[in-house]
Amino acid sequence: MTNNTRSKLEKAAYIAIICMTIFTISMVSFRYFSKSSVPTANKVKNGDYLNKSALELPNSEKVIILFISETCKFCRESGSFYQKLIKSSESKKSISLIAVFPSREKNGENYFEKDGVAFPVKSYVDFTELGVFFTPTILIVDKDSKVLDSWSGKLESDTETKVLSIFNEN
């Protein structure tokens, strides 16, 4: 290789490195400084009322709503907790349990049934119509669809115990 060719290749490599550096800095700056349109929390809060037209709830004093997805790692990891919820709900008729899957997952419950988790009541809705953006999310609502309590993400064991304690209330 001649010195002239080597010099041209070195210049091209330097230019490529400079272009990649500028591109990387601009992408990082854009991600860091731009306002994200991705929600950072669920919109639905305690005291809010759920959109009754978006989700038909069982006629119970309280309803535990599980927003879960087959693409959610934490939902899958929470299978044993969901089994406890199902078992507890069978003995307390004043409290219903409903599993809500994204409308795009028409066979989402099959994902959990493989692990022995068979939800008695299932629904498919667009989560965003209910102000939910993350799975797993658990809402406890009253007969008027008022949110009494809510949790998002994989629950710690003490929080699981708190959720299960609703079945021990009068």
Image (cartoon, helix red, strand yellow):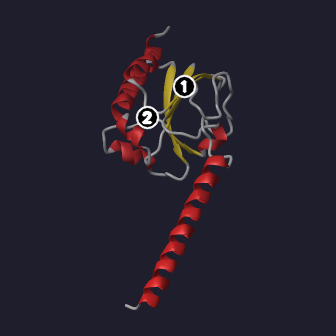
Along the polypeptide, which appears first: circle 1 or circle 2? Answer: 1
Q: Neighbour class for label 1 at 10 Å: few (<14), some, many (≥20)?
A: many
* Vertical relation: 34 (above or below) 4: above
* 73 is higher (above) or lower (below) than 20: above
Which element is circle 1 on?
strand
The image quadrant that residue 117 belongs to is top left
Which quarter of the figure has residue 82? top left
- Look at mark 1 in the image and give the residue it sits on: 63
Left or right: 60, with 3 as reference point:
right
The residue where tag 2 is placed is 120
Specify the quadrant of the image occupied by residue 112.
top left
Where is residue 6 shown, x and y percent of the image? 43, 85
Q: Position of residue 24 (x, y in %)?
A: 55, 60
Q: Would you say residue 37 is visible in this rendering? A: no
Q: Which mark is residue 37?
A: none
User: Which amino acid type is marked by label 2?
Assistant: Pro
Question: In the image, is residue 18 above or below residue 142?
Answer: below
Determine the residue positioned at 48% across, 36% down: 136
For image coordinates 58% across by 57% down, the residue present is 25
